[in-house]
Amino acid sequence: MENRQVNLTRVYQLSAAHYLKSPFLSEEENKKTYGKCGQVAGHGHNYIIRVTVKGPIDAVTGMVTDVAELDKIVRKYVIDPLDHRNLNIELSHLSILTTEMFIQEIWKRLKPHITQVELYSVEVDETRKNGFQYFGAGH
Amino acid sequence: MVYLTRKVEFCASHRYYIDEKSEEENLKLFGKCSYPHGHGHNYILEVTVKGDVNPQTGMVMNLTDIDKILKDVVVETMDHKFLNLDIPEFKDKIPTTENLVLYIWDSLVDAIDGCSLHRVRLHEDPFLYAEFYGE
């Protein structure tokens, strides 16, 4: 019974600016592909980030993981460095600042530090109308 | 196969505390959740069942039946209760969201008739939820 796998999800918000431009496309193609998301002055979102970890429940604490510890990791590596910032500047190593690229960056930042439990998925809602989920490379 | 999710809300209080540990150790382990007189949440429970659509009714499961089960099994036992004291399961076990989700799964799994329980997801507040798929 103790080995049953429970998912625990914590929800965070991150507000940041970005714009979309692909270095692999011409100016014309960029305009056509990204429309108003490509305006170089940028725009912003209240990103909702859901971090899900998975594991058995600790018999003593009744918890899958220490939520305060998870909060600390997410704040240190994702929220604090990126909240109220410009993603194109902070994450200039990414070729294009789509949420698809951003979500993988979040995974990459969290994965090495979440060691007590399995990082199961990261979800990012860019707006109330579009969201993304990532389970790590190969999933 | 179609998946059907029904939501239900219940309000309950609880406290995270291990009797064998000191007040200080509990505070370190559980933070505010260990405060002596408990605290409460508006829990939102999402129950997802899965099954083939019945060709006569066009339904996976009648929502009225799900509602009755959720009322009898979950709401009646948990709504406006102090979970540590009012539910025997949590006499010696902390009613964390994780433990609650397993308790609710175990309470529902045999009551769901004609299709199968797929997922139980319990939101403690807008920023934390636990879920179980029967794995």
Image (cartoon, coloured by chain):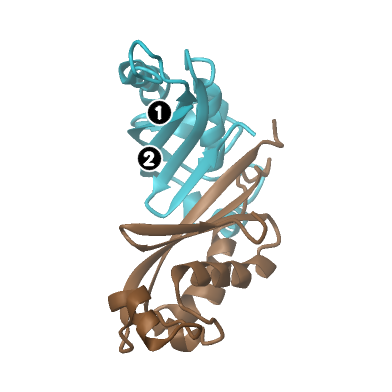
Q: Amino acid at mark 1?
A: Met
Q: Chain of mark 2?
A: B
**Residue of label 2:** B43
Tell me: residue B98, above or below residue A112: above
**Which image quadrant for residue B56?**
top left
Q: Amino acid at mark 2?
A: Tyr
Q: Judge depth for marks 1 and 2 and give the one in front.
A: 2
The picture places residue A127, in percent across and down from the top left corner, at 32, 63
The picture places residue A53, in percent across and down from the top left corner, at 60, 53
Q: Are marks 1 and 2 on the same chain?
A: yes
The picture places residue A43, in percent across and down from the top left corner, at 30, 80
From this viewpoint, is residue A44 visible? no
The picture places residue A16, in percent across and down from the top left corner, at 37, 78
Q: Chain of mark 1?
A: B
Residue A19 horizontal side relative to residue B100, left or right: left
From this viewpoint, is residue B61 visible? yes
* Chain painted in brown in the figure: A
> Which one is nearer the viewer's eye here, A22 or A43?
A22
Q: Could you tell me which residue is drawn at 31 percent across and 57 percent down?
A: A129
Q: CA distance from mark 1 to mark 2?
A: 10 Å
**Circles 1 and 2: CB distance less than 8 Å?**
yes
Q: Which mark is residue A99?
A: none
SS under mark 2: strand
Specify few, some or many for label 1: CA neighbours under 10 Å numbering under 14, 14-19, or 20 or more: some
In the displayed orientation, state which residue is furthest to the left: A36
Q: Which mark is residue B78?
A: 1
| Mark earlier in primary sequence (1, 2) | 2
SS under mark 1: helix
Colour that chain B carries in the picture? cyan
State the quadrant of the N terminus of chain A.
Answer: top right
> Which one is nearer the viewer's eye here, A79 or B24?
A79
